[in-house]
Image: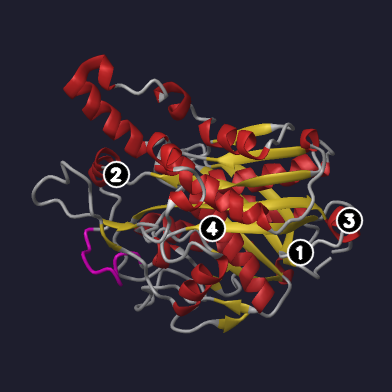
Amino acid sequence: MTADGREIAVIGAGVKAPGGVTLDGLWKRVLAGDSAIAPYQAPEPGLPDGVSIMAGEATEFDGVAYVTKAEVRRLDRVHLLAIGAADDALRDCGDRPDPDRCAVVCGQAYGPAAFLDQGYARAAAHGMRGLSPFTIPLVMANSAAAHLAIRFGFEGPCRAVSSACASGADAIGEAAEMLRRGAADLVLAGGVDAVLSVWSALAFHRTGALTPSTDPGQASRPFDLNRDGFVLGEGAGFVVLQRLADARAQGRQILGLVCGYAATCDARHLVAPREDGALAARCAELAIADARLTGADISHVNAHGTSTRRNDLAESKAMVSVFRGHPPPVTAVKGVTGHMISGSAAVEVIVSLLSLRDGLVPPVAGYRVPDPEIELDVVAGTPRPARGRYAISNSFGFGGHNAVLVLGRGDAA
């Protein structure tokens, strides 16, 4: 691929995730294949007797490091995670363009789960007096995006993207398109979700999609023969994007590139993936074409890898189709973090960029026994050299949402 004005540089990144709240901290954990999953410590009144749920909690994150104590009390966990990751992403980016040329695109699939749980309880106990006057502004779907724009004074487009578990990837892809068409000169983009509350944990448990395992090291094991469900997580990932030519002209430090993006929809079922993976495959093919590359240019795949039987198998079929029976090495982050919903999509993009930067594909945590139906070269045990300049990151969500991003090493263009 040659530099032609379409390449988008990543000039900053921040993460708040299970296993790491800094880039280096999370990257070391992912490279080691060290799971951060543990039993969910639900707040009062707790989970019903006999119900045990595993979770990926960002236990190292403390919102007070980013906002006042009053804001910690007033905001939901989802807003605090977004602010923390976004602050880190912007910290080392240097001077910014005029405010009206700076934009925000934030992916978020679910609302402020803990705030709603607490609000219902207070209203039941104290009536209207127990209901926060901030309830409506905090539960709006655009609340995290708006908080970020207000915090940083970004007066350009401010967009909220909600496409289930693909939201964070779609946000980054749409942000790249915004830069390509000249609607902004710098965009803060990423995803966040914090669905760990008693109500939402039980609701996910009721779907039957969560793992029944109580072994932290085996609860989330993407592509493993014995995988039996996913693990709920919380987290945020944000990147700062700028046109590559502008970033180079301004002497920015470049973490990597967003080279291509595509989105499709299975249009079949609200929660189940299309079993043949055909639309996920089409999405990857379109993203690779958008990057003006071929499948042979892709060094590895950062898979959606939920650790559910149907999703992993459908993704395997999709990748086999895209790469004509010979997919490159495949990794998946959710064995370490659990499923952070919108946060996973964005964090996995950042991990892909770190893989390309350091030339290492991390192993899939929890992966022990190959599944004969999964025709992928799953990286297991130890990191593997990343032999190339490009990777793809897959994100698929309830409702049939598919999003694929093609990422490049900082010197790829």
Q: Is residue 378 magenta?
A: no
Q: State how far apart marks 2 and 3 are (Cα).
A: 44 Å
Residue 5 is situated, as x and y percent measured from the top left of the image, at 89, 52
Q: Amino acid at mark 3?
A: Ala
Name the residue furthest front: 69
Q: Is residue 323 left or right of residue 400?
A: right
Classify mark 1: helix, strand or loop.
Answer: loop
Q: State how far apart marks 3 and 1 are (Cα).
A: 11 Å
Disc nearest the viewer among 4 and 2: 4
Disc nearest the viewer among 2 and 3: 3
Disc nearest the viewer among 4 and 3: 4
Q: Report the disc number at residue 204.
A: 2
Q: State how far apart marks 4 and 1 are (Cα).
A: 17 Å
Residue range corresponding to the magenta coloring:
212-220
Residue 56 is situated, as x and y percent measured from the top left of the image, at 35, 58
On the image, numbered disc 3 is attached to which residue?
Answer: 245
Label 2 crowd (10 A; few <14 / some 14-19 / many >=20): some
Q: Which quarter of the picture shows residue 318?
A: bottom right
Residue 129 is situated, as x and y percent measured from the top left of the image, at 27, 17
Residue 233 is situated, as x and y percent measured from the top left of the image, at 38, 54
Label pair 4/2, CB-CB below 8 angstroms? no
On the image, numbered disc 1 is attached to which residue?
Answer: 254
Classify mark 2: helix, strand or loop.
Answer: helix
Q: Report the disc number at residue 15.
A: 4
Q: Which quarter of the picture shows residue 8?
A: bottom right
